Image (cartoon, helix red, strand yellow):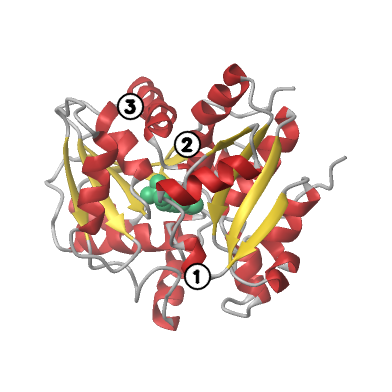
Amino acid sequence: MAIDLALPSPLQAIEHPLLLQKQVNVWVKRDDLIHPIISGNKWRKLSANLKACKNQGATQIVSFGGAFSNHIHALAFAGQQLGLQTVGVIRGEPEYANNFTLSWARHWGMQLKFVDRNTYRLREQAEFLQQLQQQFPNARIIPEGGSNTLALNGVGEIISELKRQTDFDFLLCPVGSGGTIAGLINAADKQHKVFGISVLKQDGYLEKQIQKLLGDATISSQWQLFNQYHCGGYGKFKDIDLQQMLEIQNALNIPLEPMYSGKLFIAFFDMLKRDCFPKGSDIVLLHTGGLQGLGGMAQRRLIKEEQWHIPAFPKTG
Ligand SMILES: *Cc1c(COP(=O)(O)O)cnc(C)c1O
């Protein structure tokens, strides 16, 4: 069975007084619209991995994530649709099994295996992975967030689509594990500047991760990470940040969430105010999806349900 995806994802021009004042043209690449359930960049990263699974005859996929992970949510649904069993190794307590994200993952047939923080830290170590492979011999193991070298090709398709949709000078995206931006850097041309907004506090770690994912690929694009827009760290944000995200969401009429796209849009408007983009620039902001995360944030009362666009998913099977 194939999954019905809306590709290429739409490129939407946005309007805002500040864009007129600074004389820049801005579009949002709406990867949040690729599919109502599968989150944008998580699908891009999974697509090549899922194909490889099928080609290798693997019947099962094991991967890792936190209790509210967009990757786990997308993987569970994709696995069900493609007839692959899925196992999620989840950081945290079994109580999380009933939260918004993991209830849906279970609904789509994912088996959950909860591990404590110390065990979860081993997720990239060879010995731990070997044990896991023995436990699930027919499985292919995909790293947290789906960020491996195969994922770069899937993400690179964003650039191929964009080149058919518009010319652009700058492409901005949020950065968590670095897989998405690495795929963009890898596929972009020398006239493209790829700017990553780190959603976590970091000091050089992500640059190294990105280099590692790129390996010895020949890079013609220019890229840079911006580290001052994490709003307090991974998964964190303050009331004042939420207010600003809501203002932007409502002004542009584009649904946002506070972990990734909210931080990206705050960063973009701040950089615009600081004249980071020359007059006449063509700028694309990549909306990486992740709106399912809003469900868990509302359950934890981190956000007010009525202010955000929390997706409702159809029951399947
Ligand atoms: C995972 C995720 C990111 C970060 O992508 P990386 O490839 O981990 O850097 C950005 N946006 C959303 C919505 C995500 O779910």
User: Which residue lies at the image location 18% right of the left edge and 59% below the top edge?
Assistant: 204
Q: Which mark is residue 166?
A: 3
Residue 276 visible at all: yes
Q: Which residue is mark 1?
A: 117
| Coordinates of residue 282 in the picture (x, y in percent) | 24, 38
| Coordinates of residue 236 in the picture (x, y in percent) | 43, 74
> Is label 1 or label 3 in front?
1
- Quarter holding the N terminus is top right
User: Which residue lies at the image location 59% right of the left edge and 70% below the top edge?
Assistant: 92
Q: Which mark is residue 45?
A: 2
Q: Secondary structure at mark 2?
A: helix
Q: Is residue 289 above or below residue 43?
A: below
> Is label 2 or label 1 in front?
1
Q: Is residue 98 above or below residue 135?
A: below
The earlier-in-sequence mark between 2 and 3 is 2
Question: Is label 2's Cβ within 8 Å of ligand 1?
Answer: yes
| Coordinates of residue 173 in the picture (x, y in percent) | 34, 48
- Quarter holding the C terminus is top right
The earlier-in-sequence mark between 1 and 3 is 1
